[in-house]
Image: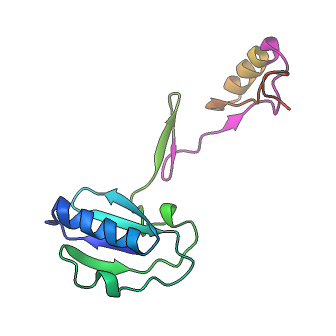
Amino acid sequence: MLIVMEHSATQQQIDTVIQAVKRLGFAPQPIPGENRVAIGVLGNQGYVNEEPFRDLPGIQELIHVTKPYKLVSRDFHPSDSVVTVGGARVGWGLQPVIIAGPCTVESREQVRVTAKAVKAAGAGILRGFGLPGRGGP
C-alpha cells in the first residue's frame, strides 16, 4: 500500500500514520516528494486493510500496490532513477552506458591493458572482480 499525504500534512500527521503502519506490524517507508510525502507500507504479503487509516488526518489517498518490487515501481517512485558511476550517468532515458571488463582480475597489468581496450571500444565503465587472494573467487 502507498499512503499519499496531503501537501499540507504536518509532520505530526505524518508521524501518526507511520505509527499506525508500525502497529499493524508493517514497515513504513516515508518517501518525500517535491509537493507531498508518501508513505510506503512494506512487509505485507497481501491486501492491507484501509480501516486503520481512514480517519487519520492529512491523508489524501490510499493506493493498493500489488506489484512485486514495490520500492522501484512507479507507484512508489514516480520519477526516473539516475545514478552516477564515476563520471558516467546511468538511468532511464539516457544514452546506454556499456560496462566491460574481466570477470576476475588476475593482475594490475591485466587491468591496465583491459581498461585501455574497454575505453577504446567505447565502454564507459570498467568492471572487474577482486584480485586473487583478496576476495576474488
Report the predominant secondary structure element of the magenta stretch: loop
Please state the extent of the stretch shown in magenta in the rendering.
90-110
Q: Nearer the viewer, residue 30 or 102?
A: 30
Q: Is residue 57 left or right of residue 41?
A: left
Residue 13 in the image: above or below residue 126:
below
Instruction: Name the image quarter holding residue 125.
Output: top right
Residue 107 in the image: above or below residue 23:
above
Q: Is residue 100 left or right of residue 39?
A: right
* 58 falls in the magenta region: no
Query: Can you say which quadrant of the picture contains the N terminus?
Result: bottom left
Q: How is the image coloured?
A: rainbow
* 109 falls in the magenta region: yes
Residue under the image location 46 percent in, 51 percent down: 81
Question: Outermost residue toward the front?
Answer: 23
Residue 24 x %, y %: 42, 75
Instruction: Name the image quarter holding residue 39.
Output: bottom left
Instruction: Name the image quarter holding residue 51.
Output: bottom left
Residue 10 x %, y %: 15, 62
Residue 116 in the image: above or below residue 90:
above
Residue under the image location 18 percent in, 62 percent down: 12
Q: Nearer the viewer, residue 65 or 121?
A: 65
